[in-house]
Image (cartoon, rainbow, N blue to C red):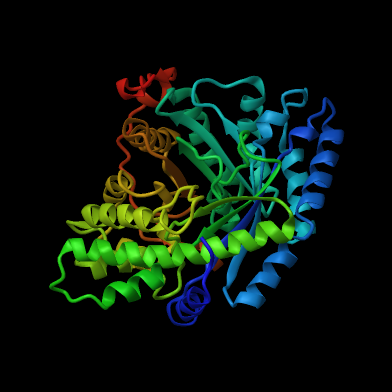
Amino acid sequence: MAIEPEEVLEVLDMVFEQNLDIRTITLGVSLEECASHSMARLCRRVYDRVCTAAEHLVDVAGAIEAEYGIPIVNKRVAVTPVALIAAGIADEDLSPVAMALDDAAAAVGVDYLGGFSALVPKGMGEADRRLIASIPRALAETKRVCSSVNVATSRAGINMDAVFAMAKAVREVAELTADEDSVGASKLVVFSNMVEDSPFMAGAIHGPGEADCVVNVGVSGPGVMAASLEQLSPEADLMAVAERIKETAFKITRAGELVSREAARRLGVAKGIVDLSLAPTPAVGDSVARVLEIMGVGRCGGPGTTCALALLNDAVKKGGVMASSSVGGLSGAFIPVSEDAGMIAAARDGALTLEKLEAMTSVCSVGIDMVAVPGETSVEALAGLIADEMAIGVINNKTTAVRVIPAIGKREGDVVRYGGLFGEAPVMALNGHAGTVFAHRGGRFPAPLNSLRN
């Protein structure tokens, strides 16, 4: 479908009046050719590969931004999960690979690089175990590298040994970066049903089934959605609300489709997906929580919030798939507490609790995202939180994730501050009654009956 001039003009109006932006252009880069038995050789190959593949990414994004007037907030790289290319190395510590990736990300000028990752839903190989053990140091000693581990799928169940290992990794990286409000944990996410083409951090990887180099684009637009819904009468029924969301999601996604086509053409790589997620920012007016409140929920987190979010998420997907033949990634509504001004306010006032957030994740795009909990939270409680969220994903056959920050030295009601897109987060209460048995049982939560689809 051709991009019409009228669409470009409409997009510009959304940019200038309603905070529309392209949240990220993410270049997926395969590292399969970099595998080696030597750590030094692997690091050198990884660095060279990323620098060569992403050499022009930032310049191309800047040129598109200038030509079309659409802000492109982040330029990122995602790579093959490092555990897949590190199996031939005998070294116990794999963090030097993360440092090579961090150096490459700095050299090409991107904001973040994802892929210090492993896929372990059914079991951990030796390289997977070493990578997970290396995550705390890797994230504490790098600035741009992000890490993600897939510990569950609806097809395989939940690897409970990996859940506990990730809870320990989250806790350790938080401790190693305690003097920076435990910021290292903000770059680490644990997944159920992880997708292999998401452009959003911290969970972006370049999946094994992808082309050699691929451009994936993530759009945003809570401000556009809020402005559109505010034009509806309070008497409009929910069918009318859903139709308005679909229409607006179509327009937002067309902007992403335009940028995706141009970026792929100019870089000379494969065009990947458009992730049509509503990704908020701490800026006033760019909030998913605000959208839910305009829909009629008195306060985000109050009764009706989960229903409103379910309608929003479904209607966004329905509108977006009509705007691009390559919709993918996570695609829906994000609810990261620290990155959404409305969520921050609702959590601070007690309207939004961690238990309500967990309920909301059953119908939204991701999960418990950018949530700060007290620094004294036990590993067992963290493992229980992760396990609960993985179960929601496995049983409902959807992607869920946990990006939780044990704020070392902080208590409930304190605040962690990161600035930029990460914003700030009030430290939320986490039920501490996890016990000391469940998290240590290990083994595998078996695949549910609905996984038998052949």
Give the left or right position of residue 3, taking residue 411 as reference.
Answer: right
Of residue 438 and residue 282, the one placed in the foreground of this image is: 282
Q: Residue shown at 46%/75% (left/top)?
A: 19
What residue do we see at 75% from left, 39% from top? Answer: 97
Say whether residue 418 is visible: no
| Residue at image coords 72%, 65% | 60
Q: Residue at x 59, y 59 (%)?
A: 260
Residue 154 image offset from top left, x and y in percent: 40, 28
Count up the numbered dots. Answer: 0
161 in relation to 319, above or below = above
Residue 341: give x, y in percent of width and height: 39, 68
Up/down of 212 relative to 53, above or below: above
Q: Residue furthest left?
A: 235
The answer to which of 172 and 163 lies nearer the viewer is 163
- Work out whether residue 129 can be spotted: yes
Q: Nearer the viewer, residue 122 or 169?
A: 122
